[in-house]
Amino acid sequence: MHLRSGFIADTSLDRRLTLWLSSLEVLAALNIALWIWIAWVVGHTPYAVAQLLLSGVYVTVCGFRSLFPRVDLERTCLWDTWLSQILLGRSAATIAELCFALQCGLFVQRLAQITGVPVLDAGAYTFVPLVVVAEIACWHAVLSLNHIGHAIEESLWALLMLILAWALGVAALETQGTLQAVLIAGCLVYGAGAVLTIIVDVRMYLRRARLRAASEYLTLAVGLRDSQIRRHPTSDWKVWREEVPWMTLYFSIGVWTSLAMVLLEWAASHP
């Protein structure tokens, strides 16, 4: 089935794909509404304002990516439009993920202040360097077409999740009430997320790396140009099926945890 200029030429779109796309649209609208609500109710402390701005970037970019889904290395997209350009999408994702890393650092640093646990303050400085290295690995994969870069990237994200789960667990031991409940929930979510990332995502990229011949790799310069001009629009469910789980979780739970970080001080002030 061929897509042209953002419109579907064949009206017999797979119902599974239609359902998934509809869910992504609902998630994008819900996430924006949640951000606006949080901006309305949260106190305008320096921490809350900084988190709100960073989360706003993350929510906006995730909304854009959910409306124009693409698979970077394979150059696959749903809509045949310049908004589906691989270079554009990857650049936006990089900015958003760096904002998320800054959120994690600010969040854990504030947790250290609230709980009085100094080791958390040291852990707060690990998130941004980890994500910078992860982004470099990701860009190398996207430009060279070598999935090993994606496997390294996802391994680093799994490590970030483990560090965040550890920080949440440590802080939960020093708190009570609403904040403790939220921290325990976050610890469980990110602990499970780290395990799933290794079991599902890393294994998937390693398998794809084994299936790709070295002759298909591109130099970084050629790959940069290729990421600007080449894309393969398709609505074939078989193409998207393997991408659905991680994209759906990324644009839902990933965004919700970004929003939740804005509410740290609010949760701490409620017994």
Image (tube, helix red, strand yellow):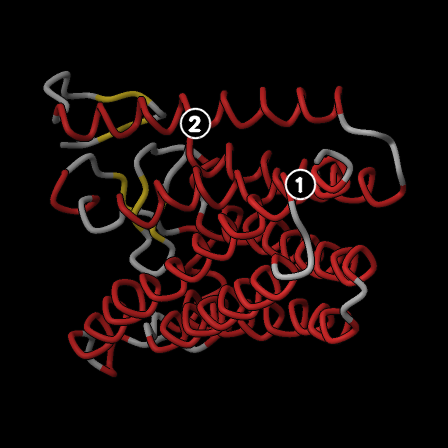
Image position of 261 with respect to 9: above or below: below
Q: Which residue is mark 2?
A: 27
Report helix, strand or loop for mark 1. Answer: helix
Q: Residue at x 24, y 71 (%)?
A: 203
Of 31 and 70, the residue lying toward us: 31
Name the side, left or right, on which 156 lies relative to 17: right
Q: Earlier in the sequence, mark 2 or mark 1?
A: 2
Name the side, left or right, on which 191 lies relative to 135: left
Of 125 and 187, the residue lying toward us: 187
Report helix, strand or loop for mark 2. Answer: helix
Q: Residue at x 49, y 73 (%)?
A: 159
Q: Which residue is mark 1?
A: 55
Name the side, left or right, on which 134 lies relative to 12: right
Image position of 233 with respect to 121: above or below: above
Residue 83 rendering spot, x and y as whole percentages: 48, 35
Q: Residue at x 76, y 39 (%)?
A: 53
Image position of 221 with respect to 1: above or below: below
Of 148 and 189, the residue lying toward us: 189
Residue 240 rendering spot, x and y as whole percentages: 21, 44
Residue located farthest toward the top when viewing the structure as drawn: 11
Gap between marks 2 and 1 measured at Cα: 15 Å
Quarter of the image for residue 260 reads: top right
Q: Residue at x 42, y 30 (%)?
A: 67
Quadrant of the drawing holding the N terminus: top left
Residue 20 rendering spot, x and y as whole percentages: 26, 30
Residue 246 rendering spot, x and y as whole percentages: 33, 50
Question: Callout 2 environment at 10 Å: few (<14), some (14 to 19), or many (20+)?
Answer: many
Amino acid type shown at disc 1: Ser
Quarter of the image for residue 47 reads: top right
Amino acid type shown at disc 2: Leu
Quadrant of the drawing holding the C terminus: top right
